[in-house]
Image (cartoon, rainbow, N blue to C red):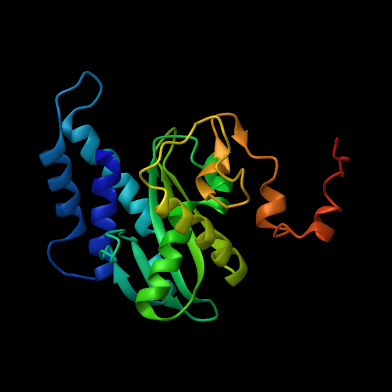
Amino acid sequence: MLLGSAIGDALSEHYRGHPTPVPEDTLRRVILEGFRDNDTWTREALVKLAQKGYEAGRGDNLRDHGEVLMVDEPLPSTARPDLVQRIPGQGLVVTDTKVTMRAGEDKLTEYFTSHQLFHYAWEVGEVLREPVSWARVHMIQLAPRVQTFLHPVEVTPARLTFWLKGAEQAWFDMDKTFDEDEPWCRDSTPNFTACYGKYGPCEYIPACHVLHLDPDQMESAYGRLERKV
């Protein structure tokens, strides 16, 4: 978490283009202020690793992709997307920075149903009064070697409407307790947080997110079972 905060804050300074404080100073300050004694890492080792992660992320030149509109600014819900841009040929694009120690690439497909990304897309669109076309994950993996991945997820009007239907129900039910082992979409109300669980992806992801629960289209991917009376 400390490495993620340091690299994220440093990248925010880079995206803003501020001459001071320089991103490297921000990175060092966050590490030194948040450091706790442990048997694995020294302060300087963490600073060096964070520096490598920041340099790799900065090297992807996301700031040059398009006009920077927002950088780590709180939305009405207090959500804070890392970067919002207007990119030629793409429209509004939201970027979320993720920092992981290892195995980052293996998790990228899960963001296709990310509640966080679609929440960012919906709320940014509401604030700027312009639809977000893409939400992407900028993943910085620190081990076994530092590397980065840029994973875009298209935000179509249909999928955003589908997400919002479930999100509004989830907000309404926020104070209720759910059974962990029971799918939240059991009543056909979508809930993106149920798409991936401890046993892997839900087998109905294509039905919800690709075929839009259209019975005719679902015939091509699923077998129909006769209802027992």
Q: Quadrant of the N terminus?
A: top left
Of the pair 27 and 218, the residue shown nearer to us: 218
Going 20% across and 49% down the picture, which residue do you hit? 27
Q: Position of residue 153 (x, y in %)?
A: 55, 60
> In the shown orientation, is residue 172 left or right of residue 88?
left
Q: Position of residue 12 (x, y in %)?
A: 26, 61
Of the pair 9 and 48, the residue shown nearer to us: 9
Name which quarter of the figure residue 101 lies in. top left
User: What number of labels is visible?
Assistant: 0
> In the shown orientation, is residue 194 left or right of residue 117?
right
Q: Is residue 72 in sight in this rendering?
A: yes
Name which quarter of the figure residue 23 lies in. bottom left
Going 16% across and 46% down the picture, which residue do you hit? 30
Q: Quadrant of the C terminus?
A: top right
Going 38% across and 70% down the picture, which residue do you hit? 124
Q: Is residue 138 in sight in this rendering?
A: no
Q: Position of residue 70 (x, y in %)?
A: 30, 71
* Whether residue 165 is situated above or below residue 229 in the rendered picture: below
Q: Residue furthest front?
A: 229
Q: Position of residue 94 (x, y in %)?
A: 43, 66
Q: Residue furthest top?
A: 39
* Whether residue 218 is situated above or below residue 228 in the rendered picture: below
> In the shown orientation, is residue 4 left or right of residue 126?
left
> In the shown orientation, is residue 31 left or right of residue 138?
left
Going 46% across and 36% down the picture, which residue do you hit? 178
Name which quarter of the figure residue 204 lies in. top right
